[in-house]
């Protein structure tokens, strides 16, 4: 198996922690403690997840593997109301560039997003200033900043959906516990 591929079989191997609980771990370490922020590990265990923690690229893969019912499905629309928690609603995002304009300019499908108008502006600037395309660095910067902001917004939406699913599960568990009492 290539070294760059995450081997999920290592994650599900279970070992006993100091309390006798079975916990998933990648490797054992005496000097590190588990973060209580990781919901699938007890706070008293003595295991180290290595590079799998919040903020790492593979963290969402591990979370989706360990908790498939809580992991948001990024291929489908959100399951919760988009305005939930926003008092005055949210500003709707609109495409500035029209479909006809994008078709006329033969813009690739992967560039047809909310930043397409800035991409068109950058391409037109490059065409006007050729061969001195470095004069269009402001347009390029604007386009790349828009793409970055779009990525951050999508990341926040994913995390929001994940938190709302976890909240719904906590509420359901609390109601179930109250019903049993």
Image (tube, rainbow, N blue to C red):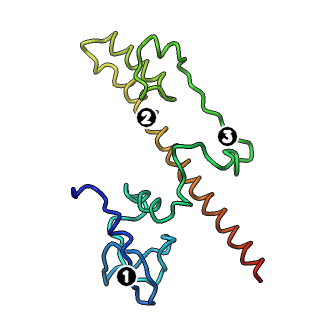
The crowd level at tag 2 (other Cα within 10 Å; few <14, some 14-19, many 20+) is some
Q: Name the residue: 46% across, 65% down.
A: 66
In this rendering, is residue 126 above or below 17?
A: above
Q: Name the residue: 34% across, 9% down.
A: 128
Q: Which residue is mark 1?
A: 15
Q: Which residue is mark 3?
A: 90
Q: Quadrant of the N terminus?
A: bottom left
Name the N-terminal-most of marks 2 and 1. Answer: 1
Taking depth in this image into account, of 35 and 20 the one nearest to the observer is: 20
Name the N-terminal-most of marks 3 and 2. Answer: 3
Secondary structure beneath dot 2 equals: helix
Q: Which residue is mark 2?
A: 145
Q: Name the residue: 40% across, 85% down.
A: 17
Secondary structure beneath dot 3 equals: loop
| Residue 27 pos. (x, y %) | 30, 75
Q: Quadrant of the C terminus?
A: bottom right
Q: In the orientation shown, which residue stands out farthest toward the left?
A: 2
């Amino acid at each position: 198996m290539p070294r760059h591929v995450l081997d999920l079989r290592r994650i599900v191997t279970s070992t006993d922690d100091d309390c006798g609980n079975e916990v998933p771990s990648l490797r054992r370490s005496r000097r590190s403690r588990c973060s209580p922020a990781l919901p699938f590990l007890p706070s008293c265990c003595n295991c180290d997840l290595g590079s799998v923690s919040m903020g790492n690229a593979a963290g969402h893969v591990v979370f989706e593997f360990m908790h498939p019912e809580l992991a948001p499905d990024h291929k489908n629309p959100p399951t919760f109301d988009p305005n939930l928690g926003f008092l005055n609603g949210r500003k709707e995002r609109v495409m500035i560039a029209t479909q006809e304009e994008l078709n006329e300019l033969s813009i690739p499908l992967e560039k047809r997003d909310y930043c397409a108008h800035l991409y068109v502006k950058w391409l037109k600037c490059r065409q006007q200033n050729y061969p001195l395309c470095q004069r269009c660095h402001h347009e390029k910067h604007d386009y790349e900043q828009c793409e970055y902001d779009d990525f951050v917004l999508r990341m926040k939406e994913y995390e929001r959906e994940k938190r709302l699913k976890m909240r719904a599960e906590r509420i359901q568990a609390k109601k179930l516990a109250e019903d049993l009492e």
